[in-house]
Amino acid sequence: MHRLLGGILIGRNIPATTDGETNNTTSLTEAWGLRSGVYTPRQLVESFSPLLDVVVHRLGSDPPNSKPARVRLLDNLAANLATDTREATLRLAEPLDVSRQEMKDQAARIGKSLVQWARESHTKSFDPSMHLRSPCEGHLLIPSNVDLMFGDRSQPHLMQLFNEYMHQMVLLRDALLPFQNYQDVLIPIDGEAARGIRHLESARAQFLAEMLTKHTTQKGVTSYAKTLLAPKLFSTASVGYGFQYAHGAVLPAFLAGGSTSLHLLHYIPAIIEPSTTDILFDYQFDDYYSAPRLEIPAGMPVNASALSFPGEEPSPVQDVSVGLIPFSEKGSQLELRIEFKCGYCAAIDLGQIARGHRYSYFARQSTSFPENNETLNGATAEAQKTPASVIVHHSTTILKTPNTGLLSAKAGGVHVIPAVDPIVALAILGKLYPENVVLLPRNEVLGQTENAGKGFEPKFVIWGGVERGRLKGVF
């Protein structure tokens, strides 16, 4: 079993085996390409290297006291994979919304890794006479490399080879954008589908067009991830929020624990259902807006100014796992299953947890915390903004409600649900109607939620189980 956040058990571990470079000796139909098999991103970078190696070889010896041609060309690649240079292939200018900022930061991280791997790549065998036609993709040379590639040292076909090298690296950078742990992803390649990874061009164009002209969506990120790893699932009626393919599973990144993202996914080297290969994981409710709304169980009205965070979970968690609900026509559903020490077991749709996490708000950050981060007393500005009365609910009471709808409150009010365990906090997110849910770290105060979320009731505050960090907290 594979373990995730808080010891969640999921699926059956599989070995991270690749065979794209070693087990396939099929002849290539072009001067350069990828053989069919399974690759890590780093192995793909190494497999692209013959394109660069031929260029460096044919450029000949470097003049004395000059920067080597290979270094100069990889400096060019670094500029192509940056997001703020003249040569950038994905240029995102400030100001950016949260979804674009996440993708910009992700592109920068991946680009730096690819360039580092390329600089560390060891020379492999290559054909010095390699020629191929590479359509112009508009990838720019840095000014100092124009003379290198078009001057006396160069030959007409070398720019074709370097253009193909740049383009394959750009395609790889962009294909890895959906994955938080991009370096771990196992990528199946059909060597006869297209040259290298050019089969991803259409999906890349669609994804980037959406990101640059509108904003990044979870649907777009998940759909794009499927084109790389599970193309058979790309044409399914529903996009879902994750999937299983032959070499692992892909799920929302918050399950990995630590600092969580807004839209990114996490590759898991585990198979959840061994009886089949490609499985789409879909939401229990296609459209949360149309889902049945259930009345939240009665809570206890409390004077908010006197409310303090509970010292322990009403019923501590004993075990937690992710399980598969039997197949349906549209796909399969995953449940987060929690067993409490009191003997009660809760099962919450993982897709709705992901949606609730994505749509949640964080309480306004306080500027008046004491240095030791102890809970503030009623004299602070934040505490003075606390509503006069709130309704407090036990987390286990919330989780015991039927899975036939999402919880809301017709009468409005501010509803506070304390949660010590991060797993419990996430599970509650999957039970509430995800419109006005605020996350409040346990060492902060209710007054900070006054201006968080939307300006109406009901408001639901999950107090505890999460800390501040990155875009969507630390679990």
Image: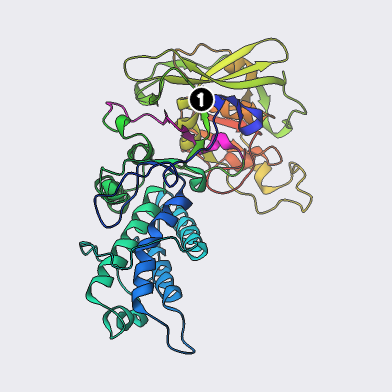
Q: Residue 179 magenta-drawn?
A: no
Question: As rendered, which of 166 and 241 lies closer to the eye?
Answer: 166
x and y percentages locating residue 354 in the rendered image: 48, 31
Chain part drawn in magenta: 236-257
- Where the C terminus falls, by quadrant? top right
* Crowd band around label 1 with a 10 angstrom C-alpha radius: few (<14), some (14–19), many (20+): many
Q: Which residue is mark 1?
A: 430
Q: Is residue 474 above or below residue 394?
A: below
Question: As rendered, which of 87 and 364 lies closer to the eye?
Answer: 87
The quadrant in which residue 212 appears is: bottom left
Left or right, residue 95 beside residue 1: left
The quadrant in which residue 50 appears is: bottom left
Q: Is residue 161 above or below residue 9?
A: below
Left or right, residue 67 beside residue 220: right
Residue under the point 24% across and 71% down: 157
Q: Residue 253 magenta-drawn?
A: yes
Q: Secondary structure at mark 1?
A: loop
x and y percentages locating residue 425 in the rendered image: 61, 29
Residue under the point 43% across and 70% down: 74
Left or right, residue 131 beside residue 215: left
Question: As rendered, which of 12 and 462 lies closer to the eye?
Answer: 12
Coloring applied to the structure: rainbow
Q: Is residue 298 above or below residue 253?
A: above
Q: Is residue 410 visible?
A: no
x and y percentages locating residue 375 in the rendered image: 75, 42
Q: Amino acid at mark 1?
A: Gly
Q: Is residue 456 above or below residue 144?
A: above
Residue under the point 29% across and 66% down: 161
